[in-house]
Image (tube, rainbow, N blue to C red):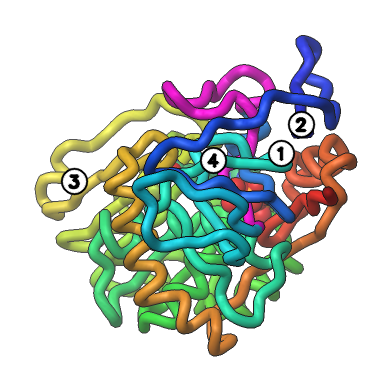
Amino acid sequence: MKAVIVAEDHSLSWDEFESPGVGAKEVLIKIHATAINRADLMQRRGLYPPPPGASPIMGLECAGEVVETGSECSRYKKGDRVCALLAGGGYSELAAVHEGSVLPLPAGLNYEQGAALPEVFATAWLNLFMEAELQPGEKVIIHAGASGVGTTAIQLCRAFGSPCFVTLGSKEKLETCLEMGASAGSVRHEGPFFEAAKAFAGGQGVDVILDPVGAGYFEDNLKLLGTGGRLVLIGLMSGTKTELDLAQLMMKRARVIGSTLRARPVEEKAEIMTQLEQRVWPKIESGEIRPVIEKVFPITDVSEAHELVASDKTTGKVVLAVES
Ligand SMILES: NC(=O)c1ccc[n+]([C@@H]2O[C@H](COP(=O)([O-])OP(=O)(O)OC[C@H]3O[C@@H](n4cnc5c(N)ncnc54)[C@H](OP(=O)(O)O)[C@@H]3O)[C@@H](O)[C@H]2O)c1
């Protein structure tokens, strides 16, 4: 099969690579589309190695058709249109993945739209609803609101009844996020978000913060949390080291939750996917929630696609179409 190979100088090529074997509980997917995640940019530079046992090829998600199933698989059969959450291996023609990480492609979606779903929907669902136990009516702050994860989180908040405030990089992105359902927001290049977020939070503070930014936002995040608030750290784009006012944490009975998706056991991923299928897939099929796609590139243009993601100019996902 072909896959995106990373050379020593970090350049990329679409080249021959060994096809994956299919385990008893795995399905083999012929990939029609995959999508880029921030983590791929780090993996390409050797800063985010795949977890043990995962494919060394980049790519945390895909959509395509089932071409083979392992002996202990029961749900899928050859020809099924699916999308899947991967621990690696999406930037290729074939991926073998545990059956529990695979979902049917929502009705009405093509493969490119399907490839934009698994990683960001699993991340946003896991961290808002499973880790932070978000309840209807609770207030949320979503940092990097126009990112793949952010645009998904906004739509989930709207669909499940939680007002949200976003931070992001431009007025245009803010307009788009407000149209998607955010209540208010702040452009990070125009100054600190604290005052605008405080106006949104009101006297009670916010209940949940979904934060991929880390150190640079930590102090303000903690100030904005209300009693019983939950701050879920899913990324460290501004750095890893910060000071923590333990008194504030304790007096607010607040929780800081660190969370990653990729290295979780297959059973935990299967639970996330089951909840997504039950609670979210019907809303995608009805059109209430949609995949947000900035641009689709042929996978042979993967370098250009990575540059676009790294430019911070994207809203939603950048997808790679895989031609066979
Ligand atoms: N823990 C997990 O399991 C998990 C899973 C998936 C993703 N993530 C994390 O979630 C974040 C979003 O991922 P994604 O793939 O959806 O990203 P994405 O679509 O590539 O968007 C990332 C956005 O973050 C903003 N940004 C970049 N550098 C920043 C900085 N220093 N401070 C503040 N904002 C900055 C930029 O938007 P603006 O210019 O508009 O602000 C950029 O477009 C990433 O940090 C990623 O690592 C974590």
| Within-10-Å neighbours for mark 3: few <14, some 14–19, many 20+ | some
Residue 45 belongs to magenta span: yes
Helix, strand or loop at mark 3: helix
Q: Which residues are magenta?
A: 43-64
- Of badges 1 and 4, nearer the viewer stands 4
Q: Mark 3 is on which residue type?
A: Gln
Q: Quadrant of residue 247?
A: top left
Residue 204 belongs to magenta span: no
Q: Mark 1 is on which residue type?
A: Ser
Helix, strand or loop at mark 2: strand
Nearer the N terminus, badge 4 or badge 3?
4
Tell me which residue sits at (35%, 56%) in the image: 126
For the residues labelled 1 and 4, the Cα–Cα distance comes to 11 Å
Q: Mark 2 is on which residue type?
A: Val
| Circle 2/circle 1 CB separation < 8 Å | yes
Say which quadrant the N terminus sits in: top right
Nearer the N terminus, badge 2 or badge 1?
2
- Of badges 3 and 1, nearer the viewer stands 1
In the picture of the structure, the residue carrying the numbered disc 1 is 92
| Within-10-Å neighbours for mark 2: few <14, some 14–19, many 20+ | many
In the picture of the structure, the residue carrying the numbered disc 3 is 248
Nearer the N terminus, badge 4 or badge 2?
2
Numbered tag placed on residue 96 in the rendering: 4
